[in-house]
Image (tube, rainbow, N blue to C red):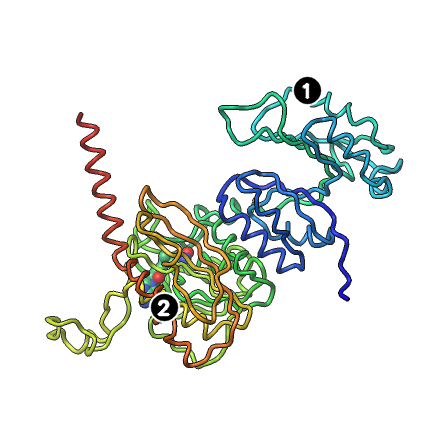
Amino acid sequence: MAMSCPLNRYLLLMAQEHLEFRLPEIKSLLSLFGGQFISSQETYGKSPFWILSIPSEDIARNLMKRTVCAKSIFELWGHGKSPEELYSSLKNYPVEKMVPFLHSDSTYKIKIHTFNKTLTQEEKVKRIDALEFLPFEGKVNLKKPQHIFSVLEDYGLDPNRIPENPHNIYFGRWIADGQRELIESYSVKKRHFIGNTSMDAGLSFIMANHGKVKENDIVFDPFVGTGGLLIASAHFGAYVYGTDIDYNTVHGLGKASRKNQKWRGPDENIRANLRQYGLEKYYLDVLVSDASKPSWRKGTYFDAIITDPPYGIRESTRKTGSQKEIPKGMEKCPESHVPVSLSYHLSDMFFDLLNFSAETLVLGGRLVYWLPVYTPEYTEEMVPWHPCLRLISNCEQKLSSHTSRRLITMEKVKEFENRDEYSHLLSDHFLLYQGHNSFREKYFSGVTKRIAKEEKFSQQ
Ligand SMILES: C[S@@+](CC[C@H](N)C(=O)[O-])C[C@H]1O[C@@H](n2cnc3c(N)ncnc32)[C@H](O)[C@@H]1O
């Protein structure tokens, strides 16, 4: 019979940003570090307070070394819907678990954290005084305490209806903070080499976490652009590699994306970006290559494929083509124009991406990518499918009233066989996601309609 580890309770304080991305991030990281998410915890939805049951503090610490969605984690000593409930729950917490942190040689401090309400200093002191019954024997040290304890009060999510008393009160020992500061320190604003579609730092880290990227992994981005996604993976210790169809982007040439700069300067490239963050040793290479015609020998190379394919809004969706593929009427182009650039339908692009991932990912490896959708027509069945890839999560980020992009995470669950190459074409998904082909037209028709509506409104 398998021995099961006793689970300890921890309180996660989540950031109130990118709400849909939080659960898949925490689940992915827990599965990376050996913890498991218990299904009843799925109900936390929008709340910033999540109770986790995990086997060890080490797992909690590892989780916090990676998460950008959680702010802090606490060992949960007590929880109640009123102060009385909290105190009785604290009285039931085993003293032997408290003593190592409260003995006479230790120093400590108690902090009060409220969500959706501000307390006066006097109210905070009252709450601290009410905890006198706990066997604190150490000395208070506000500047550099050995142990920090927190009372966390939850006043709900509605800023227009703040209740007199909190819905929930928690007491815990602080263990670690998450990696929220990475969002600032890796901000695109301060980055050496950027483009029009450089991925926001916070989302890049979320993608690497959904992809379960770990040390010594090999991570590939087939639509690498300025390499924003490679940076996040390299930060977590993975070796990174990318391709892009655009020669100028790969070589850091051409027009600059910054306002006050006309042309890209010397050394504005992906390698220099990694150098900026002390991550150059994780740079494998970036090549000019067309994702529709991958030049890889058969084999499994990548632990994760993390990418943001073009949607055709701020960058074109294109692929190289041969004279044979040139559309009718264009035949007169001179020979020197080969390879020509053909438009690359979104549905074909996702079909190629899934197939390529199914072939080249290691078993258990993950594909993480953005799928643009026209929201009025979107249904879950549209999400591209492949017999070798299992859907792990699908999170929406709204782009406008009628468009959004969905972060899709898939895991390779079956070895690729030749017959898998076209089997997903037989499914209804393929027909459904062909609807994505007109995403660009729908995006602009929506934008045009909205501008027209706004103009009409302002003239009234
Ligand atoms: C949304 S951008 C990627 C941005 C990138 N994540 C970053 O942080 O800069 C998409 C990229 O795909 C490239 N692309 C378009 N068609 C392609 C193709 N057929 N093969 C490879 N790259 C392609 C574009 O040149 C563009 O750089």
Q: Which mark is residue 427?
A: 2
Quadrant of the image occupied by residue 267: bottom left
Q: Nearer the viewer, residue 181 or 417?
A: 417
Q: Type of residue at label 1?
A: Glu
Query: Residue 119: x percent and y percent?
Result: 63, 22
Q: CA distance from mark 2 to mark 1?
A: 61 Å
Give the crowd class for mark 2: few <14, some 14-19, many >=20 residues within 10 Å: few
Residue in view at x 39 percent, y 63 percent: 384
Horizontal arrangement in the rendering, residue 330 relative to residue 159 (left or right)? left
Label 2 residue SS: loop
Residue farthest to the right, as pictured? 104
When the figure is inspected, residue 360 is found, relative to residue 448, above or below; the finding is below
Q: Nearer the viewer, residue 147 or 442?
A: 442
Q: Which mark is residue 123?
A: 1
Residue 268 is at least partly visible in this image: no
Horizontal arrangement in the rendering, residue 229 relative to residue 57 (left or right)? left
Image quadrant where one finds the C terminus:
top left
Give the crowd class for mark 1: few <14, some 14-19, many >=20 residues within 10 Å: few
Query: Residue 1: x percent and y percent?
Result: 77, 66
Quadrant of the image occupied by residue 12: top right
